[in-house]
Structures are given as C-alpha cells and as structure tokens.
Image: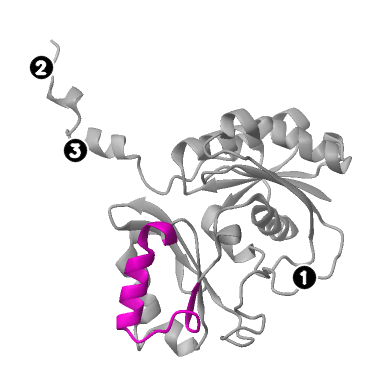
Amino acid sequence: MYILAIETTGPQCSVALISGEAAVRSSGSGPDGGCRVLGMESSAEALSHLRDLVPLTEKLLSRLNVAKSALSYIAVSAGPGSFTGIRIGVTTARALGQALNLPVIAVPTLDAFAYKERTANPVGAGGAAGDEEPVVCAILNARRGQVYGKIEGWLPGCPCMLTDVLEIIKSADGPVKKAGRPVLFFGDGIDAYEGRILEELGDAGMEPGREFFFAPKEIRYQSADAVGRLAYTLAQAGEGSHYGDVHPDYMRKAEAEQKLEAGELPICKLPKQE
C-alpha cells in the first residue's frame, strides 16, 4: 500500500509517501500503527503552495521510483488552517483522486499532530519528564486570542479561546493534571502566544521543561509525514472517500464572511439598488 499525503494548511506545503508494509515503529514517534514514511518533500518558501505542490509531488515520486499507478490512496490535510492553503490542498487531492481513480482520505489537521515524529523532543526520551508519554496539545493561531485547538484525549479539535485550552491544562482538578503527564505543544499558536502560555501556566505552578514543553521548530508545524501516518491508520479502519465527497474543513467562517453577515463591510453600507 502506498499513500500520497498532502499538507498545505500551514506556511510551507509538503508531500510525503507512506508505505503500508509492516515496519517497527521508531522510538518516540506518533502512533503510526506500523507504517513507514518513505520520503517527504517540502517547499523552500512560505506561501508558495500553488506553485510548488505539483512539482514537489512529481519530484518525490520520481526520487522514490514509485509510479502514480502504484498509489492506493491520496491523503490531504483538510483543515483547519490557512483558508487558501486548504483549498489548494483539497482541490489537488480531489483532482488526483479523479485522475487516478483513487479514494481520498481527508485528515483532520489538528489530529495529525499526534502523529508527528517526536524523537527531537526530550519528553519520553530520557528528558526531564522521564518516560511519560506526553499529552499532545495542538494550537493554530486564529488571531485575536483565538486558536484552533486540540488536547489529545480531552479537547476535540475546535475553534476556541487560548484561555479555554490553558484552563483545561492548568486546572488543579482538571483531567490533564490528574493524569500526571507532561504537555507537548505543537503549532504556530506557540509563535503567537508563547509568552501568554508561559505566564498562565507558570502562575498555575507548572514548570516549563518538566510539566510542559514547546516542540522545537523543526517539528513544530504541520507536515505531510504526520498526515500520511494518520491516513494509514484511517485507511486500516476502512476510511477513504470518493474524491467528490471530500471537502475543506475551515472550522469557522472567514473573517470577510463574518463581516458581511454583520453588515460591517463597505459594500453593506451602499444604497440599496431598486
């Protein structure tokens, strides 16, 4: 089984090829269920998805000497994230699914963070937190103190305030503290709100580097290898849709749509046409 995975919801786009052949899971990696990442290609520049995605796909398959006809699934990170990036990724996945007559797996972007490679992180690898498996918390910046957030096991992926996410983590009677496991943060929400996270969790008596960690930048953001690992798990469970049934998951309306509905755009203030 070969899965071509596409990730375009963040600043850099990437593509990865996943093999479903049984393989020993590498220490410290996400719950990939035995699949193997054969290779990945990423864009060198930010926000170059439209220009780079197809050439990166061709380069990856050529480098690994795998023909498109050998693919079993197309997987795509369906959102949330950059609205434009989501559209580019989903449209490309649908086109490939149609052209190659393959099922397409829509992968929730926030869920894929639990499948990130974690060998570069000290949690669970002999660091200060010992061998405790971390609680993965993914936060994507949605601006104005809002995030798209998910806490593995306790908060499903949703648009929410950053304070809502932190309250679950820091509450003395909350599930995360009761579990006694360190928290590992992923996503560009770290870049936007690192100071606030440090302050609020610090005020709650949580120690950075022991009770919570920020993933290093080389593994912090969305990537196609994690999308592919989760897609493999979903494929094993029988997931996979007709290309026409795969749609973006923006998780909330665009700011322009919200302003239009609220009558806040300049066009809303023009005289009505008879």
User: Which colour assignment does the render follow?
Assistant: one colour
Q: Earlier in the sequence, mark 2 or mark 1?
A: 1
Say which label, 2 or 3, has the lower sequence index.
3
Q: Which residue is mark 3?
A: 262
Q: Quadrant of residue 101?
A: top right
Q: Nearer the viewer, residue 218 or 118?
A: 218
- Which residue type carries mark 2? Pro
Q: Residue 22: x percent and y percent?
A: 86, 64
Q: In this view, which residue lies farthest toward the left?
A: 271
Instruction: Name the mark nearer the viewer: 2 or 1.
Output: 1
Quadrant, the C terminus: top left
Task: Write down the residue under mark 2.
Answer: 271
Check disc 3 and report its element: helix, strand or loop. loop
In the image, residue 231 above or below residue 128 = above
Measured in 3D between alpha carbons, the distance from the residue under mark 2 to the one under mark 3, in whole angstroms, is 17 Å
Q: In the visual, does 22 lie left or right of 55?
A: right
- Magenta stretch in the rendered image: 190-213
Residue in view at x 35 percent, y 42 percent: 253
From the image, tell me which residue sits under label 1: 26
Residue beneath the point at 66% across and 39% down: 242
Question: Which secondary structure lies at badge 1?
Answer: loop
Q: Amino acid at mark 3?
A: Ala
Rendered location of residue 156, percent (x, y): 46, 65
In this rendered view, identify the residue nearer to me: 75 or 13: 13
Rendered position, 184 above or below 70: below
- The question of residue 110 being in magenta is answered with no
Residue found at x 30% / y 68%: 163
Q: Earlier in the sequence, mark 3 or mark 1?
A: 1
Query: How many labels sit on residues?
Result: 3
Where on the picture, by quarter, is residue 20?
A: bottom right
Horizontal side, residue 108 vs residue 103: left or right: left
